[in-house]
Image (cartoon, grey):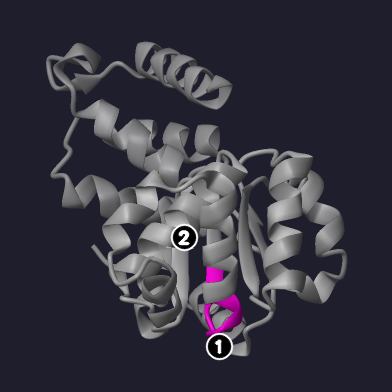
């Protein structure tokens, strides 16, 4: 399925990547940040996308792997043409090589899945932007930037931030109907359930997708009827467990 009703957001993200300006890209979990990035990034050959951003070590090792996959000339020079030996290098040595490679080229780094990034991770972002002259798109799971952590002060201006929000009610209703039709979901109380899904999700597309997927499971069905209450309770429990990780 194509991305639903995100034309303006896609264009705004496209402009940010084209401008090569560091940006805080934020929105609630499940709103579609990674999905929008996956749609737009193939248009830009210079983007390095890091999905594992739990620590400085994970960031630099991920960047090293990405640069090796691109046969980056600076990286190959420091590894004497054998990029496979990089995994044997110490973190400090690897970090130095990656920073040299970034300084020598015009990359843009995307750091996805930042979840209350620590001061150490914020220091990495600062090093990339200031020491490597490399713009960073920092992606935070937050509706109001509260989960941007120590990265937030690095991008203080409104012009350095791009928000993606949940769908409004009407868009959420249309999205829920399309997903239900795509999954060929049917039930005697389908419309009532979809109304409940839209209200309970607060327009979050990821939540809508998960609840509609759950509605097709036999444990939430009885004689062609969707058992909304147990479905929603299980959804809340699963969401709480996922957010606790």
Image position, residue 163 (x, y; %): 67, 62
Which residue has dot 2 on it? 63
**Rendered image: mark on residue 64:** none
The earlier-in-sequence mark between 1 and 2 is 1
**Residue 200 placement, left or right of 214:** right
Taking the spot 69% from the left edge, 78% from the top edge, the residue there is 133
Q: Nearer the viewer, residue 221 or 237?
A: 237
Question: Where 240 sits versus 77, above or below?
Answer: above
**Rendered image: mark on residue 18:** 1
Q: Circle 2: is it few (<14), some (14-19), or many (20+) Cα within 10 Å?
A: many
Q: Nearer the viewer, residue 11 or 213?
A: 11
Taking the spot 53% from the left edge, 19% from the top edge, the residue there is 240
Image position, residue 13 (x, y; %): 55, 76
Image position, residue 214 (x, y; %): 27, 27
**Residue 74 placement, left or right of 224:** right
Q: Circle 1: is it few (<14), some (14-19), or many (20+) Cα within 10 Å?
A: few
- Does residue 4 appear in this view? no
Task: Specify the segment rendered in magenta.
Answer: 102-109
């Amino acid at each position: 399925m194509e991305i639903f009703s995100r034309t303006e957001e896609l264009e705004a993200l496209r402009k940010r990547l084209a401008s090569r300006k560091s940006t805080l890209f934020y929105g609630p979990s499940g709103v579609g940040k990674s999905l929008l990035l996956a749609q737009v990034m193939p248009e830009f050959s210079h983007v390095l996308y890091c999905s594992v951003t739990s620590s400085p070590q994970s960031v630099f090792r991920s960047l090293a792997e990405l640069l090796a996959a691109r046969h980056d000339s600076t990286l190959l020079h420091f590894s004497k043409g054998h990029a496979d030996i990089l995994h044997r290098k110490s973190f400090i040595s690897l970090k130095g090589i990656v920073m040299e490679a970034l300084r020598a080229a015009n990359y843009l780094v995307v750091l996805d899945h930042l979840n209350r990034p620590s001061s150490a991770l914020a220091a990495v972002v600062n090093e990339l932007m200031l020491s490597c002259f490399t713009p960073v798109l920092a992606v935070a799971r937050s509706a109001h930037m509260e989960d941007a952590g120590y990265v937030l002060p690095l991008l203080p201006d409104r012009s350095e931030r791009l928000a993606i929000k949940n769908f409004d009610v009407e868009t959420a209703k249309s999205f829920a109907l399309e997903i239900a039709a795509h999954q060929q979901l049917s039930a005697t109380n389908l419309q009532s359930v979809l109304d409940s899904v839209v209200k309970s999700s607060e327009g979050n597309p990821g939540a809508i997708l998960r609840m509609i997927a759950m509605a097709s499971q036999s444990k939430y069905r009885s004689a062609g009827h969707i058992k909304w209450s147990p479905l929603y309770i299980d959804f809340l429990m699963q969401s709480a467990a996922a957010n606790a990780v």
